[in-house]
Amino acid sequence: MNEALVGTVPLPATAPSEGFAELYERTFPRVYAYVASLLRDRSAAEDVTAQAFERAYSKRRSYRPARGSMDAWLFGIARNAALDELRRRKRRAVLEADPEDSAAPAPHDQAELALRREAVRAALATLDGQERDLIALKFAGGLSNVEIARVLRTSESNVGTRLHRTITKLREACHD
Amino acid sequence: MTDVLTAIDDALDTGVAAHEDPTTRELQELALALQADSPEPTPVYREWLGKQVEAGFPKKRRSKPAWWQRLLHPAAAVGMVAAAVLVIAVVAGGLSSSSDDEAAHGGGVVADAGGGGGAAESGGGGGAADSRAAPEPAGGKAERSAGTEGGASRALADNSIIPIEPPSGRGFAPGRSDRKIERSVALELEMPVDQMARVAEQVTAVTNRNGGFVLSSSVSTGDEDSAGGDFDLRIPAAQLRPALRDLAALADVRTQSQTGRDVTREHVTAKDRLRAARAERRSLLRRLEVAATDEQAEAIRRRLDLVAGEINGLRGQLRDLRLRTDYAVVTVSLLAKHGNGGGAGGGSFDDALGDAGDLLVGVAGVIVRVLAVALPLALLALLGWLAGSVLRRRRRESALA
């Protein structure tokens, strides 16, 4: 599919080195993971991810490399779409309390691994929305601190500080 | 803190948590667990979205938005603001130019002696009575004056300013040449100081060429403040039109005014009285021839002396009236043009420079007016856009609060 995509989809005007199809192939799993982590709803995550890519496609000519990497630009769009969805559906309660409707553990998962996952998910539930957003951008989205700073419109040092505080809080929550 | 973050990034890159510090290693493991626990899309969804991307996200047919929804579009809003600014600018420019026009054209030109009056003309001296006097409306004579400023030069050049013509009124036949009109014209000509002497000479030349004469004149040249000139001219009424045209062509006409006064009634009255006096004189002469006594003859002579004095006075009055109506009083003032400003026309480089300066000033005026409207609007739009952005962002972020 890659070859067909590169051949049919116009390239972003300001990033001639990478076409939209390549961007999609490279970032799709991470964007989906980030959106799903934020929404904790796979069905909504699919809608929002598609919506985010569609928005990015229609706005691809507005991307300016000087404002940050293309990943940061795309995740900014995805974040806005996810937040709009959250606000629209009043999912705050879900974000704070509802368990994730994640896929069932694979049969070959070891018991220890499953336990650790449960502990991490329980710890994640103790975080507030902004902390969960930060964790999702970092570990599900796979963004660097610089890119997260671009998405959140803050400084890199602020992102580092908040990230350190949040992951420390997460570790303590896992111990509890 | 930086070391911890670096260690976490290393673990995410390598997939291995191997830091020496147990706490940091624990954080690395946690980071790996979070990474591994990231949701993954289903193959079906992945394939569907891939096809969407491949097809360029084909648009679903959407219903046409209502007209008010189109107005909410940012481009439409910007267009409406721009149109409003343009309209305001045009209106401001139009008002400005119309007021300029009014100032330039003054109160218009009215060339009318008005009033109308009886027209009568006797056949001249002698006792032949020629009583063709038309019925004279009330008022008998009237006086009107009109003035132009600024664009008078152009108006004169177009021959649209004409000397005072007979009015068409009741009891008065238009086009009759026997009306007696006193005409006076005042012209203010503006020119650079270095051209004043030349223009002064040409004023005299124009006067002579049209059969008139210079009653008095004074011209001073020097610096702009003291330079100037005044001419008191008499131009034959029949030559007034070409003479004015020639005078207006000498320099820029700053102001121009005309006055007309119908003195036909005075003329007719004087003539009637002259006729009556002559008739009386003839009667007295006949009575003198047949006077029976010296006393009667002496009384008739005294009366003849009185009548002769009256006849002489009336003749002088008629002469004066003829002079005033046959010649128009033209007053020409020469004014120094300051700083090459004002007035259009002229072919010199200075004139062109002046015109260019005026044009630039005009354009700058329009720009200032447009900016005066557009800048506050743009500022308001910018503030609105910023406030809207902040509000939108906060509302979005509120989903995470």
Image: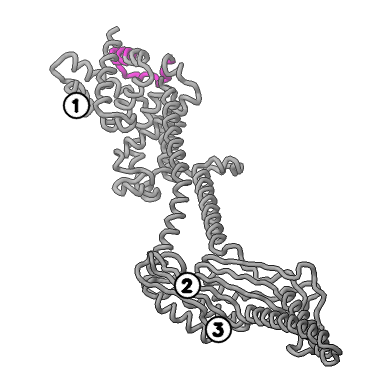
Q: Provide the secondary structure element on which disc 1 rests.
A: helix
Whole-percent x and y of residue B377? 47, 42
Q: State the residue at coordinates (16%, 14%).
A: B22
For residue A150, which quarter of the picture? Answer: top left
Relative placement, left or right, of B167 versus B18 is: right
Residues drawn in magenta: A98-119
Q: Chain of mark 1?
A: B
Whether discs 3 and 2 lie on one chain: the answer is: yes
Please name whichever residue, A169 or B183, is drawn nearer the observer in this view of the structure: B183
Whole-percent x and y of residue B4? 19, 21
In the rendering, which numbered label is found on residue B230? Answer: 2
Amino acid type, residue under disc 2 in the picture? Asp
Q: Are marks 2 and 1 in contact (CB under 8 Å)?
A: no
At label 2, counting other C-alpha atoms closer than 10 Å, the crowd grade (few under 14, some 14-19, many 20 or more) is some
Amino acid type, residue under disc 1 in the picture? Asp
In space, the residues marked 2 and 1 are separated at their CA atoms by: 100 Å
Relative placement, left or right, of B39 versus A86 is: left
Q: Can you identify the residue that label 1 sits on?
A: B10
Earlier in the chain: of badge 3 and badge 2, it is: 3
